[in-house]
Each structure stands twice: as C-alpha cells, then as structure tokens.
Amino acid sequence: MTSKILIIGACGQIGSELTHKLRDIYGVDNVIASDINTRNLELVNSGPFVILDAKNFNAIKDCCINNNVKTVYLMAALLSATGEKYPMEAWDLNMNSLFHVLNLAKTKIIDKIFWPSSIAVFGPTTPKENTEQRTIMEPSTVYGITKQVGERWCQYYHEKYGVDVRSIRYPGIISWKTLPGGGTTDYAVEIYHEALKNKTYECFLSEETELPMMFMDDAIKATVDIMQADTDAIKIRSSYNLSAISFTPKEIAASIQKVIPEFTISYKPDYRQDIADSWPKSINDTPAREDWNWKHEFSLQDITKEMLTQLGKNNG
Ligand code: AKB
C-alpha cells in the first residue's frame, strides 16, 4: 500500500486549504482528511474523509495503521480567543493531540509530523518590533502557553527520539474559502465579508493595533515548503518564526476604501484587545528565509484585491 498523509482538523480555516493543496501535489486518494465533525461539506465531499477526535489516541493510531499513514498534519486546536473562554478545553485538546502524534512518531508508526505554532508564543515582555526567533517568551494566553510548551516538546522528541517534526509560528491568516474561528486576528477576515455585505464594520480591536498577518496562499506555501525541505535544512525543531506583512485595522480599512470608497469602520475593543496587545507587531523570520528559502508574495493591497474579488464572486 502506498504511504498516505493524514490531516487532523481538516475542516478548519487552514486545514481545508491545506487538504486541497496536498491532494493537488500527492493525489486525492493519498491524502485523508479528518475532523471531529462534518461541518465543512465541500471539504468532506472532496476526497477520503474520516471522523476523528484529535484527543483520541487509539482512533488516530488505528487510522494511521489501517491506511498506512506515514505523515500527519495536526491542524486541530482551540485558538486564542476561544482558549481564554475555555482554558482547560484548550489545554486538553492542544496538548493531548500533540502528544498523540509525537508518540506515534516515537514508536515509528508514522515518520513525519507538521504541527503549527503561532505568534501567540510571545507575550507582553517580548520586544514588539521585528521580534527575533529567539527572545523573551512569556505568553499570557492559554493558547500561547500551549503553543510554547508544544514547541519545547517538539524539540525534545526530535532530540531524544529522532522524531521528524516541523513547525512554523503562523501569524494571523487571511483567507476567503473557509472562515477562521476563535482567533484574535479573525477581524482581518470578517472585515472583508462585512465590507461587501454592509459597507461597514465594527472592529473588536482598536485602530492602531498592529499585528503580523499573511495571506492563506503564502501560509500554505510555507507549510508545503518546510515539509518538502531536506531534513538537514531544518535546523530549528521547536518552531520557525514566519513573517509576511503587518498592519493595523486602520490600514486594512484604508486598503478596502481604495476599492469600496463608501466603506466605513468603527472600533469597539473587547477582551481580544488585551490578547492582541500582548503579541508582537512584526516578526523577524531570517532563519526560515535562510534555512529553507521562505519568501512571501502577497502585500496588503494584493490581499485586499484577492479577498474582495473572490468573496464578491461568491456573494454575487
Ligand atoms: C489567533 O488569532 O488566535 C490565531 C493565531 C495568531 O495563532 N490566528
């Protein structure tokens, strides 16, 4: 049987687009999508799909053994805003799912893991501008704590047991196919939907809140590139800083107004403001650029053009 790829959490914002991309590269039947439910029917009907709870070790193990799965992309997680509401659930899902796939690799049932980390590993004491790969990391959110701890375990499993685990610290990801859920950077997707529908948006972050962001196509390219890179090229086994652009709500609104002049924005910061304020404004990703040739393509204006065009087609 040819070896297969399993994506856990395939119905989500990144998982769904990653599934399609990996199927383009490796063939539809070689990529098994899985999630805890069938909430994304387009994805569910697009190729092999199984219901899988990321917290259930035996279910993941059986799926890997029965289908000769050798590579796992673990995309299931509770994100920053949801994590603050349900701290224990975030800890439970984010940590146990990671241990499950690390242990499958330790016992040689699978060969390779992709696990996403996040800019949430940084905290209020981290230098905010051009944040380095190695710097102060004192995350103040549950989600950030799970990602930071997860990074340490990835490095540990690589060093002690030779596990081939690869990871990047995603910034906020902007996409039009599948909505994000439960994140602090979600405003940068919602704003495009509201601009087309209602020509106005009430933002839950203040106008000068600058955060690192990236278009989905760049995020998928980074994910594929790091997984295809030679083993020797991957020098960091915790997680790589990854950067594209940074902007504020005011700046994204201005870029939308270039296309939709009547668009207006108002600001009503809520509990997510504290989360955003604890994160860096911009990221230095020199190691990713040097080690495996990472390069982003999409500027803010490119993203705005693509988002409004694609969402406009779907609405119209
Ligand atoms: C979130 O906002 O929680 C995520 C992230 C930056 O990891 N998008």
Image: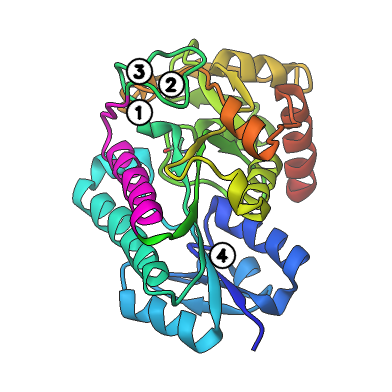
Q: Quadrant of residue 284?
A: top right
Inter-mark Cα distance, 4 to 2: 28 Å
Q: In the drawing, does residue 80 fall left or right of residue 131? A: left
- Secondary structure at numbered mark 3: loop
Q: Which amino acid is tagged 1?
A: Arg
Numbered mark located on residue 205 in the image? 2
Q: In the drawing, does residue 238 fall left or right of residue 292? A: left
Q: Which residue is mark 1?
A: 272
Q: Which span is picked out in magenta?
A: 137-160
Inter-mark Cα distance, 3 to 2: 20 Å
Which of pointers 3 and 4 indicates the residue nearer the eye?
3
Q: Which amino acid is tagged 4?
A: Asn
Of 106 and 177, nearer the camera is 106
Inter-mark Cα distance, 3 to 4: 37 Å
- Secondary structure at numbered mark 2: loop
Q: Quadrant of residue 263?
A: top right
Residue 252, given in percent of the width and then of the height, sits at 63, 20
Residue 262 visible in image: no
Q: Which amino acid is tagged 2?
A: Leu
Q: Are marks 3 and 2 in contact (CB under 8 Å)?
A: no
Which of pointers 3 and 2 indicates the residue nearer the eye?
3
Q: Are marks 2 and 1 in contact (CB under 8 Å)?
A: yes
Residue 51 visible in image: yes
Q: Earlier in the sequence, mark 4 or mark 2?
A: 4
Q: Which residue is mark 3?
A: 126
Residue 160, given in percent of the width and then of the height, sits at 33, 56
